[in-house]
Each structure stands twice: as structure tokens, then as C-alpha cells.
Image: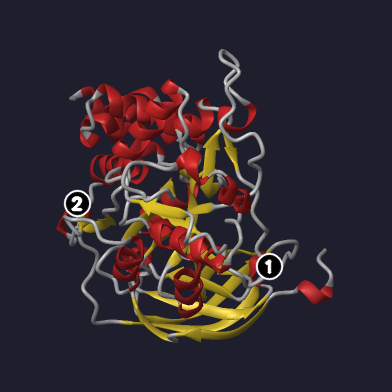
Amino acid sequence: MLPETSVSEVKTISPSEIHAGQSADITGTNLEDVLGAYLTKGQIDTRIFLLPISETRLTVSIPQGIDPETYNLELKIEGKDSRLTAGELEVISGRIQSRDAREQPPIIFANLNWDSVRMQNAIARFIVENGYGYTTDTIPDLPGHAEDVFKSLVNGSIQVDMEVWLPNLRKEWEKALESGAVIPLGKSLDVTWQSGFVVPTYTIKGDPTTGNTLAPGLRTVHDLKNYTEVFAKPGSGGKAVLWNCPPFWNCSKINEGQVRAYGLDDVIELRNPGTEEEFFNKLLLATEGKTAWLGYMWSPTKAASTLDLTRLVEPNCDVGQNPEDGCGYDDTRVRIAVHPSLVANAANLVEMFRKWDFKASTLFVAEDCLKQMEKDFEKAAVCYLKKEQAVWSQWATIDATQRVREALRRQ
């Protein structure tokens, strides 16, 4: 039995009149304890799709084909035998009845320009198309900045974003959640780290084969002022070169802000590596030759897991402070987010994305497939799905899993 102070209460159901196939928001308090939602009237007792958003907000989806009536909306509360009557919900006629999934407009995925999200897009789209029968697409054809793509999710031009990196989009994310413009779903990647100030460890501790130490006293970001010549490159005017994110990534602007906030403008030049592939090639060439390298890095990546790298010490961010204010990145959460229209039009996909969990181990399998298939993401997705059936089958329904397996046998 839950203490009385934690009993869920409902304030509003909006809208109270709704067409079948649409969604309604429930606001109140202690709604995190809600386990199920039901439409009831007389002998009718129909469980409907429930999506928890926060402690104060839930979304329910009204199934297609339900008869126009005024129903009681009841909520099952954890630890309670009886249900909470949230209020009345009138289902009205006039909406087109359920269509075949193939007749619906394509489900649009955010086309961002880094490998892990392109792999997840290709894997998810194969499952969605072959397992659930929906058509899919990506917009834009040419990727924009991460924040521009997120705006397309908010306005409904995109329905699925497989990698929302936080805190990189913290302000946009919190605003969208508050307004109900996006729905947060499952984990995309493991809880991870990122930093704009990373060096190979041999830079500080020395190369064990030669004993050569490039920057023995380097520990904090401010120590870089003493080692500018170590990281200087041709054309940098004596400044230390810090390899930044590719320019379309939101972290590129954050790293620029950090350099300014730390007062390092006079000693650091931020350089654009071009593409993600060129970025890693520069790091690998440096580590093979045991030369100096300074730049941004994140996990989970093979480079972060296989190379011996050291993050320079940075101040922790205070509450409400952002990295560009002059502090280190918090631990990073990477979330899947969808537009609310997906709840009404493809609730079964929302349930799949809630279960999605692309751990580092399964990401590395995907990366091996991508290398094997020479950067062909569609072929790499097929390779991954064949190898990792025990993983992705936990996300999809039994029927969808069977259909995906049949599609893979035809590849």
C-alpha cells in the first residue's frame, strides 16, 4: 500500500472530445505510479495505450475502430486494487477508420551525419518496414545542424530522432518536453562521456618504448598554456591545435564556447576535421606515430574503448550552468525521441522504441559490419540484424521478429 501522499491525482484530460486514432494528454500529480489506462462503459472495459511522460503528464492513445461514446477513463495505480477514475472522455465520430500501415504517409527519421545514428536509422527502418509494414524515409537528404533537425522533430516534419544528445541540446529538449512537442522514449546509447580536451595518455606519461614525454605536467585545461608548442601545427601561428567536432554537430559550438570561457583563445586554434572518418584517421595516425594530438572525443566509440586516452581536468558544471559557460560536460544521455503523432498513427512502433537499447557491445558489432560493408549503411544493417538477433528481437513483437527474420533470409 502506497502512502497517502503519493496517490496519483488527475487535473485535466485534454482534449476531452477526441477522434479514434488520436491522443489525449493527462496532467496531474504522482502520475509516475500509473501502470495502465482503460476506457470503460457498462460491459466495455478496453485497455488502451499509455505512455508515461513525467511525474505530472501521461499520454493515452485512443484505438482506431472504437465506437463513438462517452467513456470513463480509468487508471490502474501501482499498489492499489481499485482504479482511479480520471474523468470522462468522449470519443466522437467523423474520423477515417484505420488504414493499412502501408497506406499511411512514410515515417520520417532524422538524418544526422554521424555513423552511429545512421546505423541505428538503417537498422530501425529495416525492422519498421519489414516487421511492421510501414514505409519510412529520412529528411533532410543533406543533414543540417543537430539543433535544426531537432526543430524539424518539434514541428512534425520528422517523426523519429534516434539520437538526441544531452546536454548538447538541453535547452531545446527541456522546452520541447515542457510543451509536449516531443515524447522521450528508450535509451539510444549507453550513458556515456564526452570532452573537448582529450589527449593520448603517452603525451603525459611518456612513450614506454622510447621514454619520450611530450607534456609531463599537463593535467588541467589551463595547463595547455604551458604546452602550446607541443600541439602546434603548420599554419596555427604557434597556437595549440584542438581538433573539434565536425561542424554540423552541436558540440562544435559548445567547444568553441568552452575555449572562450576558459580564456584560451590566445593559445588554442579550433580546427575542423572535415568528416567523422577524417577525424578518427587523424587520431589514429597520431597514436601510431606517438605524436601529439589534442581534441574532442566521446564514447561509446572504438577509439575511446581501445586507445589509451586521458581527459584533461575541467571544473564541474554547477546547477543551471552549461559547458560553454566554462565547465566540463556532464555525463551524456542519448535518448530516442518521437513526435506525438506517432503515438496515434503507429503505437506499436512507440512500444518498440521504448524497449530499444543500443549498448556499446551491440554498437561495436554494427561498426564492424559497417567496415565490412565499406560504409554501406543498408547492407551493414542487414549484417547487424543477422548477427544480433538475440538483441533486437527483445525490442520487436514476436510477429514482427518473425517477419524480419523472413526478410533477412531473402537478403
Residue 137's disc number: none
Q: Quadrant of residue 182?
A: bottom left
**Considering depth in this image, is 43 or 151 the residue closer to the camera?**
151
Asked if residue 358 lies left or right of residue 384, the reply is right
Asked if residue 304 lies left or right of residue 128, the reply is right
Q: At 59% from the left edge and 35% from the top edge, which residue is drawn? A: 215
| Identity, as a three-letter code, of the amino acid under mark 2 | Thr
- Tell me if mark 2 has few (under 14), some (14-19) or many (20+) residues whose alpha carbon lies within 10 angstroms of its own: some
Q: Where residue 318 sits: x, y (%)? A: 68, 67
Q: Is residue 353 above or below residue 201?
A: below
Whether residue 357 is visible here, answered yes or no, is no
Residue on which disc 2 sits: 135
**Considering depth in this image, is 256 or 77 the residue closer to the camera?**
256
Mark 2 vs mark 1, CA separation in Å: 45 Å
Q: Residue furthest top?
A: 209
Asked if residue 110 lies left or right of residue 297, the reply is left
Residue on which disc 1 sits: 318
Question: How many marks overall?
Answer: 2
Question: If the image is split into quadrants, where does the C terminus sit?
Answer: top left
Q: At 35% from the left edge and 72% from the top edge, which residue is drawn? A: 154
